[in-house]
C-alpha cells in the first residue's frame, strides 16, 4: 500500500423523507465502484509493475472516506452505509442482484415495510398504535418504521473496514433536541445569576471499535462514542440515534433519547473551544434524557459539522486541498425566489412571514457558509436528482425528477414503484457524477492525489471539462469507474458489465388513481377518525366525526393527494 497520504472524502447526506431512496441508490453505486477499483489495484500490487499482466490503465492513487454526516433520511442512509461497509454479506443492487438481497439500502428504502400481507402505506395507516385514553404520538403509525429499523440494524458477520474507509470513520447524525441544552454565560454586574442560552441543535457522533479505538467515550475532550457492533447495547444506541434523526415532526413519532452526562459535559468545549465563562446547566443525574425529532428541522444539510470533523482530523491534508466534500441532496433548496414586492402587513401575512423567517434563519448556518466559502475550487460537490427523457431525438431535462417528491417527500410511502424509480435514478446519477464531475484538473493531480497515473490510465479515464471541446481543461476522476473503457469517447465495458456499464434513466412510474382510492379510502377514513377522536377525546365529537367530519377531512385530503400526484405525472 502506498505511503502517500490518502485523498480524504467527506460525505454529507441531506434529509429527504421517503426520497432517501435516491440517496440509497447513490451510496450503493458509490460503494460498488470503490470496491471494483480497489480489487483492480490489489491485483496490480500483487503482480508488481514489471509483471506482463500488470494493468497500466488502472490509476493507483488512494482515497479514503473519513466522515459521513446525515440528517433525517440522510442519517438513516449514513447508518446503513456504516453497517454495509462492515457486513461481509453485503451485495450491491445491480443487474446480478435486481431484488437487492443482502443490501440494506435497497431493503430499507425500496422494499420498506412491504410484505405478503400489506404494503408500507397500509401499515402507516393502521391504528394499532392508538391507545385508548392517550393522545396519539403522530399522524401516521410509526410501527412500520420500527420494523424496518429492526430488520436493517442488525449484523451477523462483522468484517473490518475496506481500505478505502478510514479506521477512524466518523458517523455524525443530527438531531433536534426538544428539551434543549442550557448553557450559562458569565456576566459581571449587580446580579450574579448570569444569563443562559439554549441550544436545540444536537448530533450523535460515532466511531467503530477496532485495535485503535476502544468501546465507550474516549479519554480527554473528544466528543464521540465508540461503538462495538457485537454488543447489543451499542447496536441499540445506533438504532435510537437513527430513528431519532428520522423522526419527521408530527408525521412520525418523536423518540426519547438517553445519553451520558459525561458526553453532554463535553459539548461546550466542542462548540466554543477553550473559551472561558460558559458551562452546561445539567442536573446530577448521570443520564441526560430528551425528546428528539427530525435532525433536518434545524440542520438538514450538515456539511458544516462534517467539515469541522474532517479538519479536526486532517488539517494538513485540508490545507493542501487533498480532500473533497460530496453532498447528496434529493431536495437542494432552490425555491426562495426574491419577492417581487414587500408582502402585505395584515395579521395572516405577518404570521406566515414570521414562520418563514424563523425557518430560513435556522437554515442560514453561518458557520457552514463560512466553511464552504473557505474551500478551494474542485473541493465541494453536489449530487442532486437529474432525470432526462427523449424529446425530438434529444435528451432533455424531464419536468419531474423524483417520484417520491410530492408532499415534501412523503409520496414514496404510497407505492413501491416510486421508491424503486428513485433508487435506480440515484445509481444512474452517481455513475454520471463519478465519471464526469467528481474530478481534479490535470495540473493538480500529483499534488492532490499524490500519484500521477500512467499514460494509459490517463488516456482511459481523463476527459475535457467541456465535452466536445478538446481545448478545454483535462480532468481526471477522483474515483475511477472500472466499467469505463474510454471516458472521452463515452465507451463502456458492456462485455463484462452488461447493462450496468451504462445505466439508463429509469422509466418514470405512475399508478391508477381509481385503484389507489379503492385500496386506501377506508383506511384513510379510519385513520382520520382514530387520530382526531384521540386528540379531542369527546363523546359528542366522536359521533359527529363518524357522521360527517371524517368524510369532509377525507375529501380534502384525497383531493390534495390527487392534485399532487396528478401534477407530478404519477396518477393516470
Image: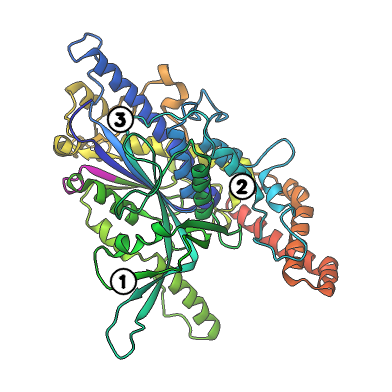
Identify the mark at residue 480; answer none if there is no mark. Answer: 3
Front in this rendered view, residue 312 or 285: 285
- Nearest to the observer: residue 216 or residue 136: 216
Q: In x, y percent, where is residue 81?
A: 44, 39
User: In this rendering, would 403 be left or right of 128?
Assistant: left
Q: CA distance from mark 2 to mark 1?
A: 38 Å
Q: Can residue 508 be seen in the rendering of this structure?
A: no
Give the camera-side residue of 345 and 478.
Answer: 478
Here the colouring is rainbow
Between marks 2 and 1 in the image, the one whose residue lies nearer the viewer? 1
Question: Which residue: 30% across, 55% down?
Answer: 221
67 sits to left or right of 58: right
Residue 467 in the image: x percent, y percent?
A: 28, 37
User: Circle 2 sits in a helix, a strand or a loop, which is it?
Assistant: helix
| Residue pointed to by mark 1 | 278
Q: Which residues are magenta?
A: 318-324
Numbered mark located on residue 146 in the image: 2
Amino acid at each position: 500500500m502506498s505511503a502517500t497520504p490518502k485523498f480524504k472524502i467527506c460525505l454529507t447526506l441531506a434529509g429527504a423523507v421517503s426520497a432517501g431512496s435516491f440517496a440509497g441508490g447513490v451510496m450503493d453505486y458509490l460503494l460498488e465502484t470503490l470496491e471494483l477499483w480497489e480489487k483492480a489495484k490489489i491485483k496490480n500490487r500483487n503482480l508488481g509493475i514489471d509483471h506482463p499482466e500488470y494493468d497500466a490503465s488502472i490509476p493507483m492513487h488512494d482515497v479514503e472516506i473519513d466522515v459521513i454526516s446525515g440528517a433525517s433520511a440522510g442519517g438513516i442512509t449514513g447508518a446503513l452505509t456504516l453497517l454495509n461497509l462492515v457486513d461481509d454479506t453485503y451485495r450491491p443492487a445491480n443487474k446480478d442482484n435486481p431484488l437487492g438481497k443482502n443490501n440494506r439500502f435497497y431493503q430499507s428504502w425500496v422494499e420498506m415495510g412491504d410484505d405478503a400481507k400489506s404494503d408500507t402505506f397500509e401499515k402507516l395507516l393502521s391504528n394499532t398504535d392508538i391507545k385508548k385514553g392517550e393522545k396519539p404520538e403522530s399522524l401516521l403509525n410509526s410501527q412500520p418504521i420500527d420494523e424496518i429499523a429492526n430488520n436493517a440494524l442488525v449484523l451477523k458477520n462483522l468484517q473490518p473496514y475496506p481500505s478505502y474507509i478510514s479506521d477512524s470513520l466518523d458517523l455524525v447524525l443530527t438531531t433536534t433536541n426538544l428539551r434543549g441544552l442550557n448553557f450559562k454565560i458569565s456576566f459581571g454586574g449587580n446580579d450574579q445569576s448570569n444569563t443562559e442560552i439554549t441550544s436545540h441543535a444536537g448530533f450523535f457522533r460515532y466511531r467503530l471499535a477496532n485495535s485503535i479505538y476502544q468501546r465507550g467515550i474516549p479519554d480527554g475532550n473528544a466528543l464521540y462514542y465508540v461503538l462495538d457492533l457485537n454488543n447489543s447495547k451499542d447496536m441499540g444506541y445506533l438504532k435510537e440515534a437513527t430513528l431519532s434523526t428520522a423522526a419527521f415532526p408530527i408525521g412520525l413519532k418523536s423518540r426519547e433519547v438517553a445519553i451520558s452526562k459525561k458526553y453532554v459535559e463535553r459539548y461546550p468545549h466542542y462548540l466554543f473551544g477553550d473559551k472561558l465563562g460558559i458551562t452546561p446547566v445539567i442536573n446530577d443525574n448521570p443520564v441526560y434524557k430528551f425528546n428528539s425529532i427530525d435532525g433536518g428541522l434545524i440542520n438538514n444539510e450538515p456539511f458544516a459539522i462534517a467539515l469541522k470533523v474532517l479538519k479536526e482530523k486532517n488539517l494538513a491534508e485540508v490545507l493542501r486541498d487533498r480532500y473533497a466534500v460530496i453532498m447528496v441532496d434529493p431536495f437542494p433548496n432552490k425555491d426562495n425566489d426574491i419577492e417581487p414586492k414587500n408582502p402585505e402587513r395584515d395579521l395572516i401575512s405577518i404570521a406566515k412571514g414570521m414562520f418563514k423567517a424563523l425557518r430560513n434563519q435556522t437554515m442560514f448556518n453561518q458557520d457552514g457558509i463560512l466553511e464552504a466559502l473557505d474551500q478551494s475550487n474542485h473541493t465541494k460537490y453536489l449530487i442532486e436528482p437529474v432525470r432526462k427523457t427523449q424529446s425530438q431525438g434529444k435528451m432533455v431535462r424531464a419536468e419531474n425528477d423524483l417520484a417520491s417528491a410530492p408532499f415534501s417527500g412523503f409520496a414514496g410511502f404510497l407505492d413501491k414503484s416510486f421508491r424503486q424509480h428513485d433508487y435506480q435514478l440515484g445509481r444512474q446519477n452517481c455513475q454520471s457524477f463519478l465519471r464526469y464531475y467528481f474530478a481534479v484538473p490535470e495540473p493538480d493531480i500529483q499534488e492532490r492525489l499524490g500519484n500521477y497515473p500512467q499514460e494509459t490510465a490517463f488516456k482511459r479515464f481523463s476527459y475535457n471539462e467541456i465535452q466536445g471541446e478538446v481545448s478545454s481543461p483535462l480532468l481526471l476522476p477522483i474515483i475511477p469507474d472500472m466499467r469505463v473503457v474510454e471516458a472521452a469517447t463515452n465507451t463502456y465495458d458492456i462485455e463484462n458489465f452488461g447493462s450496468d456499464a451504462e445505466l439508463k434513466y429509469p422509466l418514470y412510474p405512475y399508478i391508477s388513481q381509481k385503484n389507489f382510492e379503492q385500496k386506501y379510502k377506508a383506511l384513510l377514513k379510519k385513520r382520520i377518525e382514530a387520530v382526531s377522536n384521540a386528540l379531542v377525546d369527546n363523546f359528542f365529537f366522536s359521533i359527529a366525526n363518524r357522521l360527517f367530519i371524517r368524510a369532509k377531512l377525507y375529501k380534502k385530503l384525497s383531493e390534495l393527494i390527487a392534485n399532487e400526484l396528478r401534477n407530478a405525472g404519477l396518477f393516470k
